[in-house]
Every structure is written in structure tokens, then in C-alpha cells.
Image (cartoon, grey):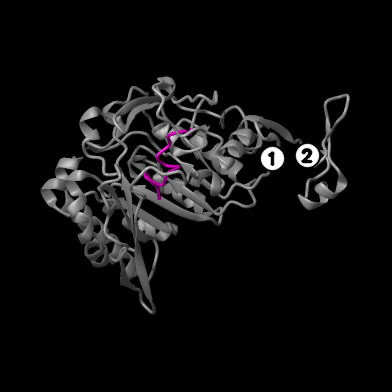
Amino acid sequence: MKIIIEKNGQIRLPQKYIDQYEIETGTEIYLEPTEEGIILCRPIPDVRKVYIEPTSRCNLNCITCMRNVWKEKTGDMYMNTFNLIFQQLKSFKHLRAVALAGFGEPLYHPNILIMARHIKDLGVELSISTNGVLLAPIAEDLVESGVDKIIVSIDSVNSLDFASIRNGASLNGVLDNIRFLNKVKRRKGSMKPVVGIEFVAMRRNIEEITELPKLASSLGAAFVLITNLLPHSEDMCKEILYDGTTELSSGASWPVAHRTWLQWATLHRPKMYWGASRRCRFVEEKAFVIGWDGKVSPCYALMHSYPYYIFNRRKQVTRYVLGDVHQENLMSIWMSREYVRFRDKVRIFDFPSCVDCGLACDIAENNEDCYTNVPSCADCLWAQDIVRCP
């Protein structure tokens, strides 16, 4: 492709490329220098999915949570912040899904039902990730508001082990809440919200994975998503399974009966070893994340500041903020030079692989890399499909 740079710094492309890539007149194009040449980064308003964190507070104290080592301020999203987001999301014509999720408990927010109703007014799919403790009291409202999916965290099928992992919750209590939700759905003749289960796989619960399909079937769950542990302390490092020596049982399916038809539900497994293939689901799905304070980040991994251990090596992640809805609109943030260039870099995954590099360096300790990327996705467990999100 021939690129002509005018004296005023403007870029001119041959007409055939303008036609081929449907580039509108006046569209700003960013240049990204690489070892292979110059990449043209074109801003496109093609957001498909948005994650909104209603709160970073939680009613539980799980052993797997970053809150055990967190130093960030926690809080609930103000409704004026949510209203700003809601109004700005209307400009994304390709938006298909919104998830109320994050590192807090969404149902802990006092106005979660108002948020849900507003999002459904956008005509998009709405999912909520929850620990399930607060589910029953608002089950009827969730059904009436049209929530599409409820993903409940269940990290053990054994009551004692469940209580030791998810401090402050009981397995029977959570299961009863899901059954009550299903009862409300039947009474109202609704198939929504569809129930899903998220399971964090560890040494202590690996033997229980084979029991998940039976549990899911009894709850009418349409899917089970298994993810690996992201350890935030040295003690939790001994719980990881993705060291290349562990294999999970093969995928399973089970029937979920609805009023007039039958669905086959599925179990989704993570990758259990570090490998060469890397991809970012957030970039592929054209998604971004909005924290409880209205600040925008590209993914879960970079939405907060926290330490974690990757194969016993400690690293400190610093929150990567690309904009704030109180200062600029979401469209401007998505189309900004910094964000467009970041997405293109992640799309081609122009990062080293720090895990199997073999060189003794300390650059990765602060989530940087030898390609001068800050932040770096070089050893991102999400990009390996080792850690997964709904």
C-alpha cells in the first residue's frame, strides 16, 4: 500500500484502499511503527460488548479474591455516573451485550435493578455475574426486568469446602436461591434469566469437576464455565493446576428442559498449560470495561491495581485507564489514538512471551516488557485462555 504524507502531516491513501476498507472522508488514521513496517490503525465505532462494574465492594471474603491483597479504594457506582454511561451507550450502534460484573458483587449495589432495567431498554443482552447470596430477594424483579443470564459462582459441590473457599456463604443457601429463581421463572412462564455456573479450578476442588454436570443439570443450568485460579498470594500458588501436569475431564453435556423444547447444556474448560497461541477475547469481542468510578479500561486484567503470581513469580499490575466518562464520552475514548493503537497491538499480539523467555530479567515484575510495552500483555493468563470470564 502506498501512503502519501502531505506537508501538513495529513495522510493520503490511494482511492482503491479507501473503497476497499470503506474509509470515510475525513477519518483520522493512526500510524503504528513496527519491525515489519508501519501499520495503519483506523478508529471504528464497532463496540459489541461492555462490562460495567456496579461496585467493587462485596459481601463475602473469598480466599481466591484480590481483595485480600488490595490497597485500592472501594465503592459503589453513583447513579449519575451510571446515567452518563447509559446515555452514551446509545451512540454505539453495534452494541449487542452488556455485563454487570467486575471484582465486586453486583447485587450488593442498592440500585442494581434500576441499572438492569435501563440496560434492557437499550435492546441488548444483559448478563449479571454474582455469588448468589443475595439472589432470592430480588429474583422476581430480575425475571420481570428481562435479565438474560445470571452466572453464579460455585467453587465446590461440598458444603464444607464451599464455606472454606467462599467465606460468608453456604452452598445450600446459594443452591436454594437458584432453585427459587427457577421457581419464579416457571410461575411467570419465562425462560429468562438463563442460569450459568462459574467454577474456579484449584488443587483442592479438582476432583469435584466431574460432579459439575450433575449439579448443573439439577439446577437447570445452561452452561458451566471452568476457569483457573489467578493467585494473589504465595500461599495460593500451590493451588494452581496449569503447570502442564494436570488434565481436566473431557467436556460434558446434559439436557435442560424448557416448557416446549429441550436444550443441551455444555461444560467449557480452560487451557491447562502455557503455549504459543495467544489471543485477547476482550479485543476480539470488541469489548471494554468500565470500573465503578467511571474509568474505562480495555479488559478485566487491567481494570484495577493488584499483585498476582504467575508460576511463582510475583508481578504488580497497575490499573490502565484510557478515559473517564465524567470527562469525555465513551465514543471519544474508544476512538482515541491511544486506545486504537493498543487494540491493534493486542490484535497482532506484539508482545514477548515472558513465561518461557529463559532470560533472568525483572522487567515483567511491574507488568512491562523488553519491547517497551507499558502495560504489557506478555504473560497475560486471560490471553492464554487459562483464566476465563463469562
Circle 2 is placed at which residue position?
27
Residue at figure coordinates x 68%, y 32% from the top left: 32
Q: Nearer the viewer, residue 66 or 106?
A: 66
Residue 355 is situated, as x and y percent measured from the top left of the image, at 39, 33
Q: Quadrant of residue 37?
A: top right
Question: What amino acid is labelled 2 in the image?
Answer: Thr
On screen, residue 68 above or below 262: above
Q: Report whether 109 appears left or right of 170.
A: right
Q: Which of 125 and 229 is in front in this view?
A: 229
- Can you say which quadrant of the picture contains the N terminus? top right
Q: Can residue 143 be seen in this view?
A: yes
**Residue drawn 36% across the image and 40% down it:** 110
Residue range corresponding to the magenta coloring: 377-390
Pointer 1 or 2: first along the chain: 2
Q: How many labels does the image show?
A: 2
> Badge 1 is on which residue?
43
Q: Which image quadrant is residue 347 in?
A: top right
